[in-house]
Image (cartoon, rainbow, N blue to C red):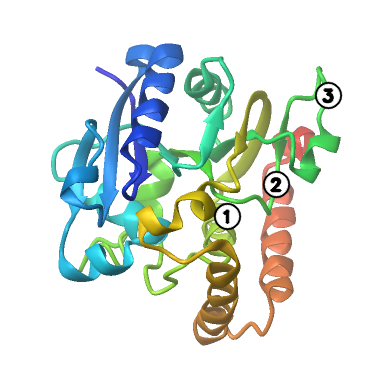
Amino acid sequence: MPKIATLILNRNLPDVSNRLVEHLKKYNGDISDYFVIESGSDEDKLSKYYKFWANWPEAREFGLHYCRGFNYGLIELDKERKYDYYFFVTGDSNFRNEPTIRILLDKMEQNPKFGIISPLSPHWGEIAFFSEKDDTKCVWLIPHVAWLFRRSYLDKIIEKNSPSYMNYFYDGTNFRGYDADTELMVKAYLNDFAVAITSKAQFYEDLDLTDKNADVMKTERKNIHKKLMFEEGLAWMKRKYGFNSKWEMRDWAKKVYNEFFERNPDYKKFKI
């Protein structure tokens, strides 16, 4: 039985999600089960691999975005079965022809303090830190596009008393996910888990996917979405943590990152 559940978000782009599932299956096979989460998609635009469909009125009108979307998929999947690892993938991910999931899993199993690991995008500035012999690094700042999570980390932070798609893992009140990835990284280091990137697995983001398909996806184009994300996200950050800028939150992330290596000197080889 697979150790991994791969969860992919879809909103009215079934062909994109179908190709993504089929690519991952081709190169990773039965190492994972694969589930598409429909984030308010129209009934005639569901992926053939969909498992869970958020089809209540608010989800149909506005979508769930990734915080509420992954919360919804995870909470529904947990009702059926819990896996050792979860690969959360957004629909704009494009993977190379390699066993990405297996590579990430191998790194996780070799390093039990890794709570999150991501493949590397050649477009990220972090690529400068990697070499053939130095292919894995721990970080305090990367976007969540394709992350493999360890279940024991999830269990440290999921909402157990009143779980819902608004609070199960991500904070769903941060609707567009501004610095939600930083928040999860902070929670990892506070719970003595590290966040890693490996250049052994690489991918890239289709940054134009939403703009090219905004009407079909029933969402805002990138320039409008980013403006709303910053405005709403900064209000969320100030309300929840008292921070007035993303730099204050990221300074906090770097602080807990440094403290992790003081507690775990064996992992200093991964420190940037």
Q: Is residue 144 positioned above or below 55 on the image?
A: above
Q: Point out the tag, 3 or 2, that comes first from the N-terminus.
A: 3
Q: Mark 1 points at which residue?
A: 185
Q: Mark 3 points at which residue?
A: 131
Q: Is residue 39 positioned above or below 269 on the image?
A: below
Q: Is residue 168 positioned above or below 36 on the image?
A: below
| Residue 9 at x, y percent in the picture | 36, 45
Report the disc number at residue 225: none
Q: Point out the tag, 3 or 1, that comes first from the N-terminus.
A: 3
Q: Mark 2 points at which residue?
A: 139
Residues under labels 1 and 2: Cα distance? 9 Å
Q: Marks 2 and 1: in contact by CB < 8 Å?
A: yes
Nearer to me, 207 or 188: 207
| Residue 258 at x, y percent in the picture | 74, 55
| Residue 265 at x, y percent in the picture | 74, 40
Could you tell me which residue is drawn at 42 percent across and 29 percent down? 20
Label 2 element class: loop
Q: How crowded is mark 1: few (under 14 residues within 10 Å), some or many (20 or more)?
A: many
Residues under labels 3 and 1: Cα distance? 24 Å
Instruction: Check disc 3 and give the amino acid type.
Output: Ser
Q: Is residue 258 visible?
A: yes
Q: Is residue 40 positioned above or below 130 on the image?
A: below
